[in-house]
Amino acid sequence: MTEQTTPSSGSALQLLSVGLLTATVGFASAFTIVLQGLASAGASPAQAASGLLALCVAQGLVAIWLSVRMRMPISIAWSTPGAVLLIATGVPDAGFSEAVGAFLISAALVVAAGLWTPFARAVSSIPPALSSAMLAGVLLDLCLAPMRAVGAMPELALPIVLAWAISWRYARSYAVPIAVLVTVGVIAFATEIPEGTLTGSWPTPVLVVPTFSVDATVGIALPLFIVTMAAQNLPGLAVMNANGYQPPVRPIFVATGLASAAGAPFGGHAVNLAAITAALCAGPDAHPDPSRRWIASSIAGAAYVVIGLFAGVAAAFVTASPPLLIQAVAGLALFGSLGAAAASGFAREEDRLPAVLTFVTTASGLSFFGIGAAFWGLIAGGTLWLLSRLRHPI
């Protein structure tokens, strides 16, 4: 039965508020992770701010274009798991320029997944348990940061953790933004920030000439592509389907891949379908009439572009703050992602042992030939998964 709505059953204010909330939650819950990831890959504070600006503008413009074109609430976000991957991988041998080259290769793979059906089919054939276990292994170290911070500086970290826990109990959608606000307050009142740090910090696009290497392609580009597809694009499509939308996949992959490629030279690592915040614009809370919810995602896209103007201030504040506190609030923001990845990875008994091997190898930080643990985790788990499916000799 077609849903019947009346003009009074929803309002423009409802669409506006949900759109602004989506952008605010999306930015506040993960900008520290993005900045930490870019810095871990070798970006300077100016390059990290430029990368954050590029991501905000790219995801905002793509969200507006796709939402208006398809008349569906297409929410776009940066790849938070990809940023965590950068934290785990560290600085490439040639510095941030080599990471930027890997960003471009990853973006090209996303475009290829949209244009070439057999390639998309091959990517989707990676066992979900292994990709989820790899993501869980990547997330684990950062999710330990809140407890490390409590142990090292309890007077500063405990208020942040308690604020997050209490907010999670009573207003889960606001738990991470509230924790970020408390972190800002704690840092402002309890630590010394050099005078002038937050002045003159408007973001300036910084062009980084990319360099390419086999090590960065295998150690950064391929894992970034896999976690972006497995942990962002596929769940994002599932959220859309659960709310009654069937968006065409090809233009979404091509648009986000091209946007990622455009943002990469300015430090942005990847944009993709939103997974968590997508539910805000696609669900009934955005508007009772499903045919009008695209307006909310368009507003969210416009808000992202505006919020990007504050990327320089955010980067300057994070750079001047105690690293362990920034990692702590980032870890709190990733608890839900870690739980979902672990639950998906270890759900099926027949896949559990290969998934465990993938998880522990990825979490170990193992590195060979300059290639990070995420790739080796997938190789180790995939090998065991294939062996488990060989026919037993009679």
Image (cartoon, rainbow, N blue to C red):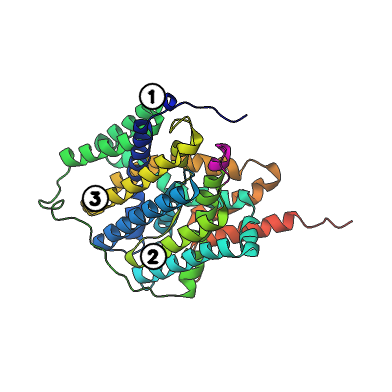
Q: Amino acid at mark 2?
A: Ala
Secondary structure of residue under mark 2: helix
Q: Amino acid at mark 3?
A: Phe
What range of the chain is rendered magenta? 239-246
For the residues carrying marks 1 and 3, which lies nearer the camera in this image? 3
For the residues carrying marks 1 and 2, which lies nearer the camera in this image? 2
Which of the two residues, 129 or 328, is positioned nearer the viewer here?
129
For the residues carrying marks 3 and 2, which lies nearer the camera in this image? 2
Mark 1 Cα-neighbour bin, 10 Å: few <14, some 14–19, many ≥20: few
Q: Which residue is mark 3?
A: 310
* Residue 85 falls in image quadrant: bottom left
Q: Which residue is mark 1?
A: 170
User: In x, y percent, where is residue 338?
Assistant: 49, 43
User: In x, y percent, where is residue 196?
Assistant: 11, 52
Residue 269 visible in rendering: yes
119 within the magenta span: no
